[in-house]
Image (tube, rainbow, N blue to C red):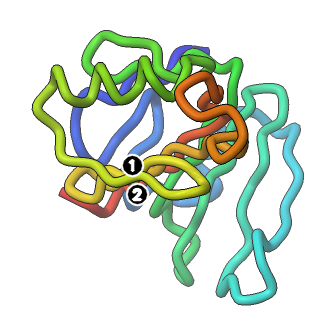
Amino acid sequence: MIFDYLTTGSIGPLGVGMPRAEVRSCLGEEFRTFKKTFLSSNTLDAFDHHAVHVYYDDADLVKGVELFSPINFFWRGKRLLGESYAELKKYLVHQGVVFSSDDFGVEVDALGMGFYIPDISDDGDFATVKSVYIDLTVG
């Protein structure tokens, strides 16, 4: 499945405010449900065969999506998961996007995107983008 982030509020077949039952109907009935952390107010659905986690608000409506490499995630025509930190930075600068980096990855606050790059401290520019979280409520 291809997840193309074209418009704020939606990615691929998923959109902000979509009910959990509709997500499950769309992505399939094979999923795991769990809380990401003990502080999470609701469970998420992990669709491992799509390499996707879907996050819900307290009313069980979609609020965010996390996509994992090697899923096909595109933003403005460019595949970003599996790319190096250097490639991601270069592309974001080329797109005129303001971002910040830390020991865990890259945040693009204005777009609600957070790229997880776990080896960034060790591998620097050669570290690989492993996942992206998209807050679909931003925008």
Left or right of 112 in this view: 72: right
Vertical position of residue 88 compared to residue 17: above or below:
above
- What amino acid is found at the position of numbered circle 1 in the picture? Met
Q: Quadrant of residue 109?
A: bottom left
Q: Is residue 26 visible?
A: no
Q: Residue 64 in the image: state x and y as whole percent.
A: 49, 57
Q: Quadrant of residue 96?
A: top left
Left or right of 76 in this view: 10: right
Q: Earlier in the sequence, mark 1 or mark 2?
A: 1
Left or right of 120 in this view: 10: left
Circle 1 sits on which residue?
A: 113
Viewer-closest of 104 and 32: 104
Q: Quadrant of residue 127?
A: top right
Please give the name of the residue rendered at 79% of the width and 73% of the height, measured from the top-left corner.
35
Please give the name of the residue rendered at 49% of the width and 60% of the height, measured from the top-left corner.
62
Q: Residue 42 in the image: state x and y as whole percent.
A: 68, 79
Q: Is residue 76 visible?
A: yes
Please give the name of the residue rendered at 71% of the width and 63% of the height, measured from the top-left corner.
44
- What amino acid is found at the position of numbered circle 2 in the picture? Asp
Q: CA distance from mark 1 to mark 2?
A: 6 Å
Circle 2 sits on which residue?
A: 135
Viewer-closest of 82 and 118: 118
Tags 1 and 2 touching, CB below 8 Å: yes
